[in-house]
Image (cartoon, helix red, strand yellow):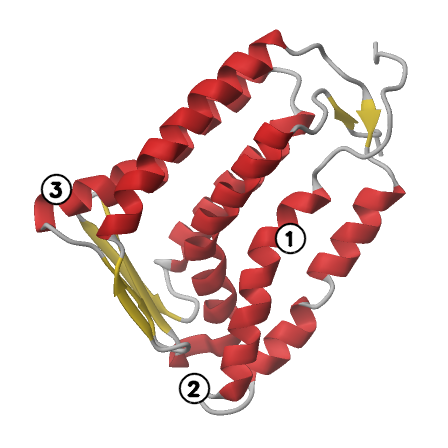
Amino acid sequence: MKTQIAYRKTSRLLTSFSILISLTFMIVWLPLVRSVFDGVSYQWGTNFYGFQIQGAGITPSFSFLVIQLAFYAALIWSMYWVKNRYLFEGLLVLWFFNVFGNLLSDIIINGDTMFHGDTLNVHISITWIIVPLSILAIIFIIFIILADRKADNQSIHWNARNTRLMWLILGPIPILGLLLASGEPHGITDQIGVIIAIAQCFLIPLIFRPYGSKSLQPE
């Protein structure tokens, strides 16, 4: 297997942006893992540019979550590990329209956007959160693109720390599955499982951070 090379080093800007990515990643990761492990007892739904997408368990609509997962994997990976930086910049812009463009259009059309989390009994209007976060996302994207174009290429290898973090953060997935698949729907086991899944959303980007110093430039 070819050793993976990071072409950008970590920065406070990218680290801060990873938190915002993780926040939006929750709306994909939570329904995905719950659809797999809870099965038909878990129902999810979302409005994507006027199209209502919903499902219970592994249904044809589950493919939407799989596509979204692949997109987030590409975005997080490209942040450091893709040499073609135009690809990373394009994914950044696409991420904004995928998340905030969709939510803002829903606010414009319907006047409000609600978030429903039955397991933790969370039901709130997120309109007042989406607007400032959208502005913050635009500011992040502008500054990240400007900084990225000025940055020099690095050559930092995927190393043992990345692998250890991968096993540490993704390793509890079988435990997560056991928690979600057992007990009463929306019960204590589901609540613990949801908390673990939320924690994973914020920890997964750590797997892809380049660790170590710059090595010789690859050919």
Q: Is residue 47 above or below residue 122?
A: above
Please state which amino acid type lies under the numbered disc 1: Leu
**To which residue does mark 3 refer?**
108
x, y (%) of residue 139? 40, 26
Q: CA distance from mark 1 to mark 3?
A: 33 Å
| Quarter residue 158 falls in | top right
Marks 3,2: beta carbons within 8 A: no
Residue count near mark 1 (Cα–Cα under 10 Å), binned few <14, some 14–19, many ≥20: some
Q: Quadrant of the C terminus?
A: top right
Asked whether residue 147 appears in the rendered view, the answer is yes
Does residue 20 appear to the left or right of 136 in the view shown? right
| Closer to us: 116 or 167 | 116
**Which numbered mark, 1 or 2, is in the foreground of this view?**
1
| Quarter residue 105 falls in | top left
Q: Is residue 154 above or below residue 44?
A: above
Q: Circle 2 sits in a helix, a strand or a loop, which is it? A: loop
Q: Circle 1 sits in a helix, a strand or a loop, which is it? A: helix
Marks 1,3: beta carbons within 8 A: no
x, y (%) of residue 20? 48, 42
Q: Quadrant of the N terminus?
A: top right
**Which numbered mark, 3 or 2, is in the foreground of this view?**
3
Q: CA distance from mark 1 to mark 2?
A: 26 Å
**To which residue does mark 2 refer?**
185
